[in-house]
Image (spheres, helix red, strand yellow):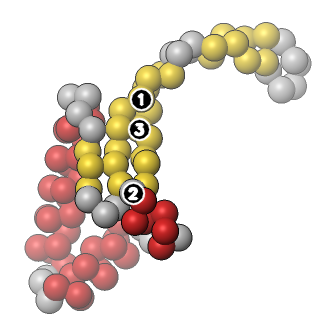
Amino acid sequence: MNKAELIAVVSEKVGASKKETEDIVNTLLDEVEAALIKGEEVKISGFGGFVKKERKAREGSNPTTHEKITIAASKTVAFKPSKALKEKL
């Protein structure tokens, strides 16, 4: 499911216009993004949580030449599903 499909499904289920639903979904995503940028964890009860993670620099190899390379440190987002969601899957 992509963002447009999500907006369409939510719009239909709650009886709101697609424009109103799109504004709500965009606001939700903006707030999750802002919290993660601040380093805060975002927990949604019964669904799961999003957390900002930092990866350390590490050594890897070029798959073509097998030459050793250094992979730079980076930041990413991790999602941990709730126990309730895991049980449903």
Alpha carbon separation for disc pair 3 and 2: 16 Å
Q: Which amino acid does label 3 sit on?
A: Val
Cβ–Cβ below 8 Å for labels 3 and 2? Answer: no
Pointer 3 residue? 77
Pointer 2 residue? 82
Determine the image quadrant of residue 83. Answer: bottom left
Q: Position of residue 22 (x, y in %)?
A: 19, 68
Residue appearing at x 40%, y 66% in the figure: 84
Pointer 1 residue? 53
User: Quick one: which residue is furthest to the right in this view?
Assistant: 65
Helix, strand or loop status at disc 1: strand
Q: What residue type is labelled 2?
A: Ser
Q: Is residue 67 left or right of residue 57?
A: right
Of the residues under marks 3 and 2, which one precedes in the sequence?
3
Helix, strand or loop status at disc 2: loop
Of the residues under marks 3 and 1, which one precedes in the sequence?
1
Q: Which amino acid does label 1 sit on?
A: Lys
Cβ–Cβ below 8 Å for labels 2 and 1? Answer: no
Q: Position of residue 64 (x, y in %)?
A: 87, 25
Alpha carbon separation for disc pair 3 and 1: 6 Å
Alpha carbon separation for disc pair 2 and 1: 18 Å
Cβ–Cβ below 8 Å for labels 3 and 1? Answer: yes
Q: In this view, does 18 lie to the left or right of 87?
A: left
Q: Nearer the viewer, mark 3 or mark 2?
A: 2
